[in-house]
Amino acid sequence: MRIPDIFLLVIILSGATLLSDSPTGIYFRFKDREMLLVHPMRKGDRNFIPRSNFSNKQLDTLSNWFDTEKNYVEIIRQDHPFQPSIGVALGFEFDEVNGEYPYTSAYAVLQVKDFRWGGVEFSPDDTLNYTGVSNAVSDDLSIEVISYQNDTITGQFSGVLLNGAGQMREIERGTFKVRVFRK
């Protein structure tokens, strides 16, 4: 092995180590704040799911699932297990059979929810909750799956989100690493 080859190997291995050592959950920068959301939905005094008579085990599955027939992943994370103030729902198209990474999703949706807001989500009066979509019509988000191994999906995202009042905000340096349950 030549010296440049050794340096290249060290750089590749250190990148793989950083990826594997990254925390489980969703990390991003939004509205000048760094956020790391690691908690799935949990039963508590304040349940935000309508008619939520789910067990914590069922909520685990609802918080990170992969529908292999529809090739769709959904991940939900929040800042606190029982009394969240901020939560994120990230859904995107993913074809595990593709085998080439990074894998760029053709369809994606991301919602940032401020649980302290008591109004109707995404109404014209709503200035605290944001959403972004990428599909055949809109290209607000960029989501790349970097790896998928042992039912753990790792990736990155960025884009522009819109609230009900028409305000736009960037979501930057987003990463996710979550074990998903197959449906």
Image: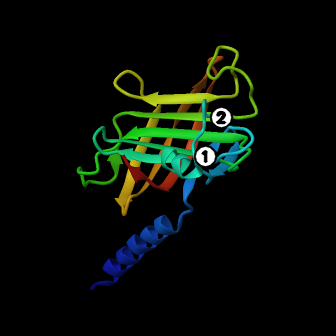
From the top left corner, tell me how far across and down residue 43 is, in percent: 66, 46
The reply to whether the C-beta atoms of the residues labelled 1 and 2 are less than 8 Å apart is: yes
The residue identified by callout 1 is 41
The residue identified by callout 2 is 48
Relative to 70, does residue 81 appear above or below in the rendering?
Answer: below
Secondary structure under badge 2?
Answer: loop
The local crowd at label 1, few if under 14, some if 14 to 19, many if 20 or more residues have their Cα within 10 Å, is: many
Q: Quadrant of the N terminus?
A: bottom left
Residue type at mark 2? Phe
* Residue in the foreground of this view, choosing between 81 and 43: 43
Residue name at image x 33 percent, y 48 percent: 103
Cα gap from disc 1 to disc 2, whole angstroms? 9 Å
Residue type at mark 1? Met
- Quarter-of-image position of residue 112: top right
The local crowd at label 2, few if under 14, some if 14 to 19, many if 20 or more residues have their Cα within 10 Å, is: few
* Residue in the foreground of this view, choosing between 12 and 147: 147
From the top left corner, tell me how far across and down residue 160 is, in percent: 54, 31
Q: Residue furthest top?
A: 124
